[in-house]
Amino acid sequence: MGLLRARRASFLSRTPLLVAAPGMFVLALTVMQESFSSWRTEWGWAWVQWAAQVQLTGPVTAGVAAWVVTDALRGGRGDWLATTVRGGSALRRSALLAAAPGLAALGVTAATLPLVLDGVEGSARWPLLAAASAVVTLLACGLLGAVAGRLAPHPATSAVVTITVWALVVGLLPAGRAWLRTGGAGESLAGYELDAEVVGHRGIALLLLGAVAFLLLRSRPITTRGPWELGGDALSVGALLVFLVWSGWFSASVYDVHPDPESRATACGTWSGTTVCVLPEHADGLAEVGPAVAAAVEVRRSAGLETGDRVLELSPWQVERTDGRSGHAGPDVGFRWSGSDTGVVGAVATVFDPVGCWAASDGLLPDQLETWSRASEVLTGLAGDLADRPVRAGTGAWATFRTLDRESREAWLRAALPAAAACRADLVPEVPAP
C-alpha cells in the first residue's frame, strides 16, 4: 500500500511539470519577440532580452512549485510523508524539479539565440552574467512557491503565488523587487555592461532563501512542531524578509546594467572629409547614420561653428559625465544614437542640439521656453531632411521655417546653432515669420 501511494504521489507531483514544459517555451518566446528586429543586431541587448523571459517563466515556476508541494500533502499523503525517513527530501526535490521546465526553456532558447542574431559582436561576459541572473531568478521563484505551498497547502495558493511573484518580478510591488527583477531592454544597450555586483547579490539571496526553504520544507506538519522549532522558523523567515526587502541591496533603483567606462566609438567611416565613428555594437548601421551626421557637420560649419574632422558617437558613460551645460562649445562634436534605423533622425539632431545640454532649458522664462521648443522642432526637421527621412511639416515651427527664403533660413541657423551648441537656450532666436 505504501509503495502504491508513493508511486501515485510521484506521478501526480510530476504531472504539472510535464504540462508546464511546453508552456514555458511559449512564455519565453512571448517575452523575447519584443523589439526582435532591433535586439537581434546587438549582442548584449539580445542576451538581456533573452534573460527577460523569467518575467513570465519565473512566476509560473513559483505557481507550479506551490502546486506540486500542495499536491504532495493532499489526500493524506502528507501524513504518509511525515512517517517516512526522507519525506522532507521529497518535498525539497519537488521544489527543485518545479524549476526544470523554466530552466529547459532557458537552455533551448540560449542555444538557438545565436542563430537569429545578425552579424553582431560582443563580450563573453554578457551571456555568462545574464544566464546567472536568469537561473538564480528561476530557482528563487521555485523556492518561494514551494515554501508558500508548504505553509498554506491549499489549491488556491498556486494562483495567488503566481500573481504575487509576477507583480514582484515586473516591479508592480515595490517591496525589494530588484532581487527578482530581470528585465529586458527597450532600447540599445551599446556602451553598457551587466553589473556583476547585482548578480552576486541575487546569488547570495538565493543561498539564504535556499537555507530557509530547507528548514521549512519538512514533512512533519507545522501543527506538530514544538515552540522552539516554530520560533526558529519564524526567525529565519523574518531575517530573510529583512534582508530582501529592507537591507537596501535590492532597492527599486538597482538595475542590471551600468555604463561601461571603457566603451568608445571605434567603428569609423569617412564622408565628404568628415570621419564619423560609432560604437562597435552599431557598426552595421554606420552606412545609414554616417552620411547624415557628416551632412549635419557641414551645416554647422556653414553657420560659422568650429568643427573638427572627426565626429564620435558618445557612449553612455561619456553622456553621464556631462554637467548638462557643456554641449559642443569647442571643435569636438559628438552625437548620441539608439542604433536603429528609426533613430537616425534623432542622432543627427544631437549634432545640432547636443545631448550634453540636457539642463539647457532649466530656469527659462515661459516665452524663452516656447522659443526653444520651436527651435528644437526646426532642428529636428532639418535633421530629418539631412537623414533623408523628412519630418512631417504640419503647421508648426518647422512648417514656418520651410516657407522662409534661403537667406533668412541661413541667418537664423547662424544665430541658433552656436547658441544651441553652447547650451544657451536663452539666446536662441525666435523662428522668423515668413
Image (cartoon, rainbow, N blue to C red):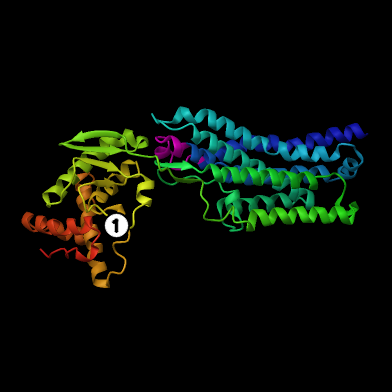
Q: Mark 1 points at which residue?
A: 357
Side of 353 where 79 appears, left or right: right
**Can residue 276 be seen at all in this image of the molecule?**
yes
Q: Which secondary structure, mark 1?
A: helix
Indicate the position of residue 53 as horizontal and vertical percent values.
Answer: 55, 41
Task: Count the numbered circles shown.
Answer: 1
Q: Residue 326: horizontal and vertical position, in percent?
A: 28, 56
Examine the rendered structure and indicate whether residue 287 appears above or below residue 251.
above
Judge by depth and name the residue closer to the eye, 345 or 329: 329
The main secondary structure of the magenta stretch is helix
Residue 137: quarter of image: top right
Tell me if residue 411 is in the magenta stretch: no
**Could one spot residue 393 in this view of the protein?**
no
Q: Quadrant of residue 204?
A: top right
Q: In which quarter of the image is the N terminus?
A: top right
Residue lying at 22% horizontally and 66% vertically, measured from the top left: 426
Image location (x, y in percent) of residue 408: 8, 59
Residue 65, quarter of the rendered image: top right
User: Please, what is the three-letter code of the amino acid marked with disc 1?
Assistant: Cys
Relative to 318, is 394 above or below? below
Q: Is 37 within the magenta?
A: yes
**Relative horizontal placement of residue 75, taking residue 178 as reference (left or right):** right
Residue drawn at 69 percent across, 55 percent down: 241
Residue nearer the viewer, 80 or 30: 80
Identify the residue shown where x is 24% and y is 71%.
367
Direction from residue 307 to residue 64 in the image, left or right: right
- In percent of the image, x 87 and y 42: which residue is there? 77
User: Measured from the top left, where is residue 434 in percent x and y?
Assistant: 10, 63
Q: Assess disc 1: are there few (<14), some (14-19) or many (≥20) residues with their C-alpha within 10 Å of its C-alpha.
A: many
Q: Give the range drawn in magenta.
A: 32-46
